[in-house]
Image: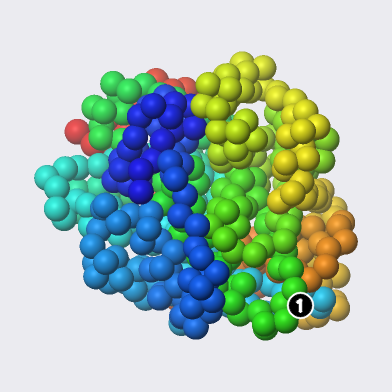
Amino acid sequence: MKYISTRDKSKEFEFKDVFLKGLADDGGLFIPKNLKKFTEKELNEFSNLNYIELAYKIISPFVDDFISGKDLEDLISKSYSTFREKNVIKLINVGDRKVLELFHGPTLAFKDVAMQLLGNFYEYYLSKEEDKINIIVATSGDTGAAAIEAIRGKKNINIFVLHPHNRVSPVQRKLMTTVKDKNVYNIAINGNFDDCQNLVKSMFADHNYAKSIRMSGVNSINWARIIAQSVYYFYSYYLIKKDRGPINFSVPTGNFGDVYAGYLAKKMGLQIGKLIVATNQNDILHRAISRGQYYSEKVQETNSPSMDIQIASNFERLIFDLNDEDDHETSSVMQKIKSEKKYDLDQSKLDKIRKDFLSSSADEKKVISLIKKVYENHKEILDPHTAIGYGGFDDVELEGTNIVLSTAHPCKFPDAIFNAINIKPDLPDELKYISNEKENFDLLDNDINIIKQHIKEKIQ
């Protein structure tokens, strides 16, 4: 499979380039030149596979020039060996809908599903190449911990994680800052997540700097993460009985990566009905899908911090599709968004979007209300992000089976849970130690030159 950039289709890339670079040199995002679509026979055969076997079937067409079949099987098996669920994820009934628990990995968030695989891709590559890599990643809370857990202790690779100072939950922060491995560097930025993300993008855009430090990225724009996340859409689909009818997913999302993975699964042939883009009050995606207004506003701090985002990086891949895969038009739109912080979608594009997507939003008050309502009625505790996804189905009427993606363990957001139901959920026993561990991070200003210099000094 060959890959192209959303902003320049003239160059082709292999999977190695795609996962190592993360972002194309022209600022665009990588997508397959020709997407694999599974036949009805193949899709029926998938229904009998366990999660590891299914992951191999879904992922292998995307990476076959990079890794042999046997090595890929071993790598996938290794990636999920530390998960608390044998089949990685768990599907439960909560009222009239199902909740897909994706937080059974080492850092209690859905990011582990993709990040563990990505970390092992790096190790596989570095075991065969005389190379050193420095990963730079921005996090709104969960990505950083998952990336650190996937990279910590690995040879010839460092990881620098930028998080917004005092804008992630204490548990999210401690899962990052209590790690003692010498190849892990935490940087707190005086700013919000969009500031962190812009700093990382600026470093990628400075090709001389990126090349000089052998920079790589694992944010949600990395295509390897998208394909890994698409697997649980397939797997949960097969967990539903045969008389399933249409299957719809509500996905709490800020950067559009997790819901785009569902869209990818649908494009590969999976019979998904609608994908609900469920946002908090930083609702740029909801405004874009419901009103055609992709307008960036000031980021508001909320009790669902992983979604406190105003520019959804992965939305560019959908813009590319909406523009009939016109790379020049996509590049023009993205330059406009960068300079004007806004983009109007006309009715024809909205009609295209609504074939696959619906949207909803919930402010902080509604999030607390949803957590309380679900606990009182069903005795299940949802984290704030999952609650937003759960509420997504309250705002629309859909036929078939409705599945909510549960993206994080509630113990990561104890204050929000306590405010809702007067309970503080405990950390799993194996992670309780972080409460008393010493934290280690550097607090820096939101200044690209300061960040670049800091990273260079650490790796020299």
Residue 363 drawn above or below residue 424: above
Task: Give the total of numbered labels.
Answer: 1
Q: As rendered, which of 79 and 12 lies closer to the eye? A: 12
Residue 412 drawn above or below residue 131: below
Instruction: Write down the quadrant of residue 241 in the picture.
Output: bottom right
Residue 1 appears in the picture as rendered: yes
Task: Give the residue at x 49% y 78%.
Answer: 45
- Relative side of 308 to 77, left or right: right
Q: Amino acid at mark 1?
A: Val
Question: Residue 284: horizontal and vertical position, in percent?
Answer: 73, 37
Q: Characterize the local packing of mark 1: few (<14), some (14-19) or many (20 or more) Cα atoms within 10 angstroms.
A: some
Q: As rendered, which of 136 and 172 lies closer to the eye? A: 136
Which residue position holds label 1?
94
Residue 326 drawn above or below residue 231: above
Residue 200 appears in the picture as rendered: no
Instruction: Write down the quadrant of residue 404 in the picture.
Output: bottom right
